[in-house]
Image (cartoon, grey):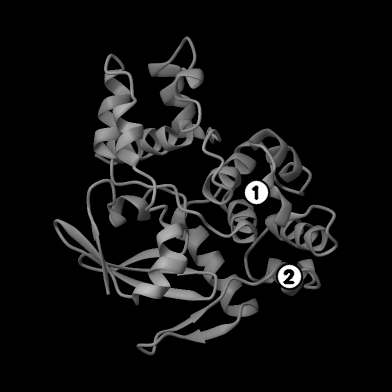
């Protein structure tokens, strides 16, 4: 077991921030997450969060996955104090971190996410994993499935995915898997590209527009200048920043601020 201080780390906020679809609340203050071929149980306390894994697994995987080497308090401290809205949003969502997720998983997940709600997105991704992923068993006996690789999806008939309720997204998933398998777009090379270059490459894939490309750049490639604009964000920008968001002031971490804004607006809308 590894304990993490809750300063700028709240697993519940990360779970509801819209960046990860295989992180779920399983009970009161308990969570589970699947990433790659790994499975992790998490217990959230008032002051510390417990990751139920060994030190080696934490150091070699989960520490990077949760971006725990980055001092997010520095991002919050750098916010213009006169921007009261952004200060409030950052304080409200200060436990959010930008996860470093698998690029391929994010490509397919955000294709599925279009014009969809989060419970349905999670259900479809679970279906995809159970049908085409690899079955695994955790140390405590939990059965889970890996996210299917591009090669596993490249040869599936589109009709098969349509039968599983993926709708029009079936075509995009199949064609994208085929392009990735054929290296027409090399996902492995995206990390070494600049944000703009990586986004341009992602836009070559079927069903990926600017917002989805930005989500992949931020939540997988960790391009921290990516700033996905959905309905929530667009309304906030129109209301709070009619002259335009000051991206130049927050170069290098505007994507973190996007998450604070998204979460703050989302939770206020639920009240």
Q: CA distance from mark 2 to mark 1?
A: 23 Å
Q: Is residue 271 left or right of residue 255?
A: left
Residue, disc 1:
191
Question: Sequence order check: which comes first, mark 2 or mark 1?
Answer: 2
* Residue appearing at x 57%, y 78% in the figure: 130
Q: Closer to the camera, 156 or 176?
A: 176
Q: Where residue 111 appears, x then y in whole percent? A: 64, 52
Which disc is residue 153 wearing?
A: 2
Local SS, label 2:
helix
In the image, residue 73 sits, relative to residue 251, either above or below, namely below
Quadrant of residue 42 in the image? bottom left
- Which of label 2 and label 1 is nearer to you? 1
Marks 2,1: beta carbons within 8 A: no
How many other residues sit within 10 Å of disc 2, few (<14), some (14-19) or many (≥20)? many
Q: Quadrant of the C terminus?
A: top left
In the image, residue 47 sits, relative to residue 160, either above or below, namely above
Q: Quadrant of the N terminus?
A: bottom left
In the image, residue 234 sits, relative to residue 30, either above or below, namely above
């Amino acid at each position: 077991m590894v304990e993490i201080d809750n300063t700028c780390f709240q697993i519940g906020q990360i779970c509801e921030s819209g960046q990860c679809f295989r992180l779920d609340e399983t009970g009161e203050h308990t969570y589970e997450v699947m990433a790659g071929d790994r499975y992790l149980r998490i217990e959230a306390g008032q002051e510390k969060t417990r990751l139920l894994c060994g030190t080696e697994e934490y150091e070699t995987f989960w520490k990077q996955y949760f971006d725990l080497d980055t001092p997010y308090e520095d991002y919050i401290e750098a916010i213009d104090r006169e921007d009261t809205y952004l200060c409030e949003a950052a304080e409200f969502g200060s436990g959010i971190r930008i996860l470093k997720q698998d690029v391929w998983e994010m490509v397919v997940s955000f294709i599925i996410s279009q014009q969809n709600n989060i419970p349905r997105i999670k259900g479809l991704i679970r279906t995809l994993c159970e049908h085409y992923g690899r079955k695994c068993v955790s140390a405590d006996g939990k059965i889970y499935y890996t996210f299917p690789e591009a090669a596993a999806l490249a040869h599936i008939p589109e009709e098969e995915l349509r039968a599983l309720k993926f709708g029009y997204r079936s075509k995009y998933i199949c064609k994208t898997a085929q392009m990735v398998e054929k290296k027409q777009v090399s996902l492995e090379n995206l990390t070494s590209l600049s944000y703009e270059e990586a986004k341009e490459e992602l836009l070559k894939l079927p069903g990926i527009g600017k917002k989805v490309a930005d989500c992949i750049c931020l939540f997988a490639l960790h391009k921290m200048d990516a700033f996905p604009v959905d309905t929530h964000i667009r309304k906030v920008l129109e209301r709070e920043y009619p002259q335009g968001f000051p991206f130049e002031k927050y170069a290098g971490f505007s994507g973190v601020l996007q998450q604070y804004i998204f979460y703050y607006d989302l939770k206020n809308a639920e009240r």
